[in-house]
Amino acid sequence: MRLEDIVGATPKVEKILDGFKYTEGPVFSRIGFLLFSDVQANRIIKWENGKSDTFREASNGANGLTFDHQGRLLTCEQNRVTRTEKDGKITVLADKFEGKPLRNPNDIVYSIDGSIYFSVIKPRNANLPADCAPEAVYQITRKGQLRIASTDCKRPNGVALAPNQQKLFIADTEQKNVRVYDASGDGALKNGRVFCELKTDAQGGPDGLKTDESGNVWVAAPGGIWVFDSEGKHAGTVPVPETPSNCAWGAGFRNLFVTARTSVYRINAKVNGTRTY
């Protein structure tokens, strides 16, 4: 598939919000609003009907966001993964692994079988305790058990499920590639291999990513949103004025919202995004 087949010959990239410190983790609710994290401002922002407001103050360093099948918000915070209940109460889903504290859960995806995958990537030059949980991709099983799903990536970042839910994609920021794994019946990952390489001399590597129903993988990385087809071939890159950190499908799982440093953008797309909640 050619890039122009899915975003047009001249991709439309629209800035919808700006003035933030560092935007991350967008997710669009099925009832019609966008949420994203302003990480350095320690808050979650809500955008609805063209207007923005604070959804949650003192967000505990919230980063990656998604919803579960009940519409409850799942959040990667600076030292835990939480679920916001319908009444607004916060339930901690994970804060330790084998007794070691989690540090910097980063991105998160919900599987229709009820399990959750999230990445832990330690900040560079951070003075973290030696006994914290390792950098890895973790799974919270449908029974609520926390286990390591993969330790292959040097700096695991974005996570996304394939449209059939039988594969998980993981962005490795340090190695500048995206890996893909087959998911077993219980959600365990196997057969890990490199799906695509991001050939760039720019500092930094792939960050957040999403898939669409045609099997394409959309990766936030230096230069914009890189689009790879189902075989891992680079179809092209949609330029974004600021370096993007993550992306999420909008209303009806169409059109892509992109968080990029101080702003949020929207890209018109001609494909349907993968539904995971």
Image (cartoon, helix red, strand yellow):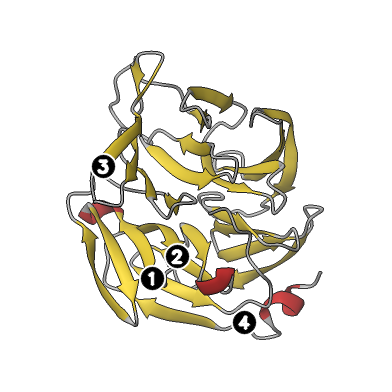
The answer to which of marks 3 and 1 sits earlier in the sequence is: 1
Q: Residue at x 29, y 37 (%)?
A: 91
Q: Are marks 2 and 4 in contact (CB under 8 Å)?
A: no
Pinpoint residue 20: horizontal percent, then vertical percent.
27, 66
Query: Dot 4: what SS?
Result: loop
Q: Which residue is mark 1?
A: 33
Callout 4 crowding tier (Cα within 10 Å): few <14, some 14–19, many ≥20: some
Image quadrant occupied by the N terminus: bottom right
* Tag 1–tag 2 contact (CB < 8 Å): yes
Residue closer to the observer: 238 or 161: 161
Mark 1 or 2, nearer chain start: 2
- Mark 2 residue element: strand
Looking at the rendered structure, the kind of residue marked 2 is Phe
Residue 261 image point, x, y percent: 37, 62
Q: Earlier in the sequence, mark 2 or mark 3?
A: 2
Name which residue type carries label 1.
Phe
Label 2 sits on residue:
28
Label 3, label 4: how many angstroms apart (C-alpha)? 39 Å
Residue under label 3, please give it. 90
